[in-house]
Amino acid sequence: IVMTQSPATLSVSPGERATLSCRASQSVSSNLAWYQQKPGQAPRLLIYGASTRATGIPARFSGSGSGTEFTLTISSLQSEDFAVYYCQQFNNWPPLIFGGGTKVEIK
Amino acid sequence: QLQLVESGGGVVQPGGSLRLSCVASGFTLSNYGMHWVRQAPGKGLEWVAFILYDGSNKYYADSVKGRFTITRDNSKNTLSLQMNSLRGEDTAVYYCVRDQNYRNVWPKNFDYWGQGILVSVSS
């Protein structure tokens, strides 16, 4: 399975909405997670099961999709949300494949 | 407070060996599958290996199969990664990661991550 994230870089102003895409080369059902990684830090689980927020994740983060097309939406970007976001599939393994990442930067 | 703390990283020559350890605290290690994930400098995340909660099965990325061995000692709350025949492309930060699934053979999500440890393979 190949996981393709787009765009590679997303320039967004604080307060705006960000929409990140993740596409699987074959169906992964809803077995998909999203992670956020800030510079110098370990990744953090944001979303699992394609749409369930992990513990402590703000409601401005939402996930949707199933099969091969998935979206992570950040409804109103805060300064702490500028980071790299990765998707990962858990349906067909091994291996457990990550997407290449989308960097959300300040516009 | 749940914690995963890696150790054992450093600089090693190509062809050499290194053993990473991860000490878990704040939860019962024997109830969870565990992974190693790595990240080369400036690159994305790469899953390396997975071991079931009871150590009964292990899985590896093709890039490390036959060279790396994942083990666990639940009595000592410790996860390990023995890395042999190291190559330049193994240079990365290695993360010890807990799988969210409780006593299950199917991985679910990576819900807790260690801070990472740097392994540098260079002559």
Image (cartoon, rainbow, N blue to C red):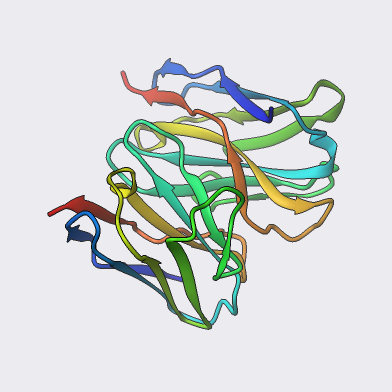
Is B65 placed left or right of A80 in the picture?
right
Is B13 placed left or right of A27 in the picture?
left
For residue B18, what is the image quadrant? top right
* Residue A36 spot, x, y in % from top left: 42, 49
> Residue visible at 28% across and 66% down?
A17
Q: Nearer the viewer, residue B92 or B6?
A: B6
Q: Is residue B66 at all visible to an observer of this figure? A: no
* Residue A22 spot, x, y in % from top left: 39, 71
Is A64 placed left or right of A10 in the picture?
right
* Residue A61 spot, x, y in % from top left: 44, 61
> Residue visible at 58% across and 23% down?
B6
For residue B72, what is the image quadrant? top right
Please, is residue B91 above or below residue B102 in the view?
above
> Residue visible at 68% across and 30% down?
B2
Please, is residue B59 above or below residue B106 in the view?
above
State the quadrant of the N terminus of chain B: top right
State the quadrant of the C terminus of chain B: top left
Is B57 placed left or right of A99 in the picture?
right
> Residue visible at 47% across and 81% down?
A68
Q: Is residue B60 at all visible to an observer of this figure? A: yes
